[in-house]
Image (cartoon, grey):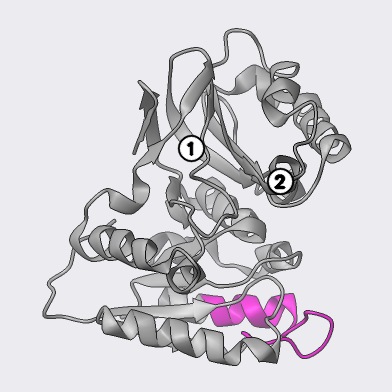
Amino acid sequence: MRSINRENKRNTTLVACSNGLSVEKTLEIQLLRDTLKKLDICTKTSKYIFEKQQGISGTGKEKAENLMEFFCDKKIEDIFDISGGDLANELLPYLDFEKIKDSKATFWGYSDLTTIINAIYTKTGKESVLYQIRNLIYDYGKKQKEEFSQSFLYNKSDLFSVRGQFVQGEKMQGILVGGNIRCFLKLAGTEFFPDMKDKVLLLEARSGKVPQMITYLSHLKMLGVFEKISGLVLGTFTQMEQEKCKPDMIKIVLDYVKESTPVFKTDQIGHGTDSKAVVIGREVLISRNLFLQ
């Protein structure tokens, strides 16, 4: 992403636009803040991080207004969403996309934040990052911190360098959209769903087995998505891969896309704590099994 002067601290904030975290995560979030501080990254924290009941930390309007405060804060350069779940799309009607467009802040999140990330691109043309910042403190934390610091602070490609293999075709190019397949489909039929013409579509999932994937892919097909895209990237499908479901996702997908549509599979994007980051809304070129943005 952007490079900075190492002598200056980077100003960021932590938010939870989807489900609020349980209070048992308090020490974990403090560890994350401490980890970022060691990288000279200062963090503010949203007042809607922790749940009050049933995953709810505030209303959609309250969380949206809080998020807009951070987008409008000229000192904030990056907004890291540390949540996931089901609730992120309730913010969309309350966001001021003109102000988001003018903001210098970049939004980061994954899973259910697929909704906000793609809505930002659709309404503003602005880039966001599909990545869970809590990966810095999990089991692959050492490597994640090394790659994150090189990319976030020094504008290198470490965190964004993704490898995989083509299962159909040998090259694709276009603006990247998508993310979690279930959450991406929440935008269908709304003003926040991207124009899919000539886009590279990224799909991944944490939960769901064969019947769920067939449902989601059928929905995308009925929306005409597979007739419009220039390529398809498959990340990890955690439950399917852990349980070795048959048919696997590659075989299922090839029944939906055109034979002329390139399909690329990678194990480096998804819900794994070793996952890389990708920029939604940025031009991507994939060839020779390397994903370049």
Q: Horizontally, is 147 left or right of 170 in the view?
A: left
- Magenta part of the chain: 49-67
Quadrant housing residue 93 = bottom right
Q: In the rendered image, which residue does mark 2 sit on?
A: 242
Horizontal and vertical percent for residue 9?
Answer: 22, 82
Furthest-top residue in this view:
259
Horizontal and vertical percent for residue 19?
Answer: 72, 74
Number of the label disc, if any, that sits on residue 176: 1
Between residue 85 and residue 148, name the one nearer to us.
Answer: 148
- Does residue 171 lie above or below 284 as drawn? above
Q: Horizontally, is 73 left or right of 112 in the view?
A: left
Identify the residue at image location x=75%, y=81%: 59
- Does residue 225 lie above or below 167 as drawn? below
State the CA–CA distance, disc 1 to disc 2: 27 Å
Horizontal and vertical percent for residue 69?
Answer: 49, 81
Quadrant housing residue 152 = bottom left
Q: Amino acid at mark 2?
A: Gln
- Which badge, 1 or 2, comes first in the chain's sequence? 1
Is residue 126 shown to the viewer in this render? no
Number of the label disc, if any, that sits on residue 42: none
Horizontal and vertical percent for residue 55?
Answer: 78, 79
Identify the residue at image location x=42%, y=68%: 141
